Amino acid sequence: MADERLIVALDFHTFDDVKKLVDTLGDSVTFYKVGMELFYSVGAGVVEWLKAQEKKIFLDLKLHDIPNTVAGGLCSLMNLGANILNVHAAGGFTMMKTAAEALGKEAALRGVERPKLIAITVLTSIAQAEWCGALKISEQVVDFAKQAQAAGLDGVVASPQEAKLIREACGENFLIVTPGIRPAGADINDQQRISTPRAALQNGATHLVIGRPIRAAANPRDAALKILNEMRGI
Ligand code: C5P
């Protein structure tokens, strides 16, 4: 079975591109991320199609609104059967708690498994130089992670560089999904808050979201296999 810690980002505009990549990657990849670019252009059908291919889905729509609206939105999304849904931690503790509770109740009512719910901490694209929060980015990330855990969420999305602090603060059994991953040998600049697969996993990441290094490779399957090889044994 493929290593489900690797989540390949399907940042495409067309269904054809999705089918081509998923077909090329074949059984080497099980988990895919559907984000706003794809969902807004292709619609919910892509999630249903991935499920029919027996793939797992992280539906990365980053909900951020008042508690009632986010809870309702998540319950609607739950119909699609994605494995992971997410909200912005910046929406607040009450929003996260309301969302987690609503999702749990709705899943119980329908007799289905509740999808995992995780929170975006601080976008990995924000570097310290452009950050204007009162806390340091890393402190804010850990604070968001603790709030998400207390609100009943299953984990967070965070930069791989903050994974270690989150793991220390939130213990085992807490999902840490890290984008901003570049294969060993790529130009890793600390300011960009990115890491290699090995470093991210060693720091406590449970899942690695990787897009362009696989999608843009001349041979995406080879690129994925190389990354999976780097992940082996960690
Ligand atoms: O950069 P890459 O193509 O690997 O990005 C894969 C996914 O990770 C994107 O869909 C984006 O949502 C997320 N990402 C991120 N922070 C970055 C780079 C990418 O959250 N610095």
Image (tube, helix red, strand yellow):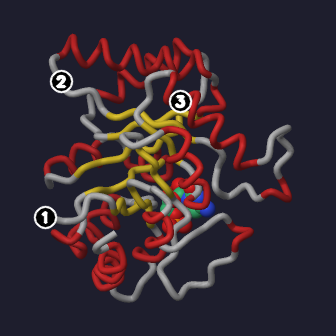
- Residue 59: quarter of image: top left
Mark 1 is on which residue type? Met
Disc number placed over residue 110 in the picture, else none: none
Compared across the picture, whether 86 is left or right of 192 comes to left
Q: Looking at the figure, which quarter contains the N terminus?
A: bottom left
Q: Are marks 2 and 1 in contact (CB under 8 Å)?
A: no
Compared across the picture, whether 48 is left or right of 149 comes to left
Neighbour tally class for label 2: few under 14, some 14-19, many 20 plus, Cα within 10 Å: few
Mark 2 is on which residue type? Val
Q: Residue at x 65, y 35 (%)?
A: 143
C-alpha separation, residue under disc 2 versus residue under disc 1: 24 Å
Q: Which residue is mark 2?
A: 112
Q: Which residue is mark 1?
A: 1
Q: Residue at x 46, y 56 (%)?
A: 204
- Residue 225: quarter of image: bottom left
C-alpha separation, residue under disc 3 versus residue under disc 2: 23 Å
Of the pair 200 and 6, the residue shown nearer to us: 200
Does the beta carbon of the residue at mark 2 sit less than 8 Å from ligand 1?
A: no
Residue 127, position as x, y percentages in the image: 76, 59
Q: Name the element at disc 3.
A: helix
Neighbour tally class for label 1: few under 14, some 14-19, many 20 plus, Cα within 10 Å: few
Q: Residue at x 21, y 71 (%)?
A: 28
Of the pair 10 and 136, the residue shown nearer to us: 136
Disc number placed over residue 148 in the picture, else none: 3
Q: Of the residues under marks 1 and 3, which one precedes in the sequence?
A: 1
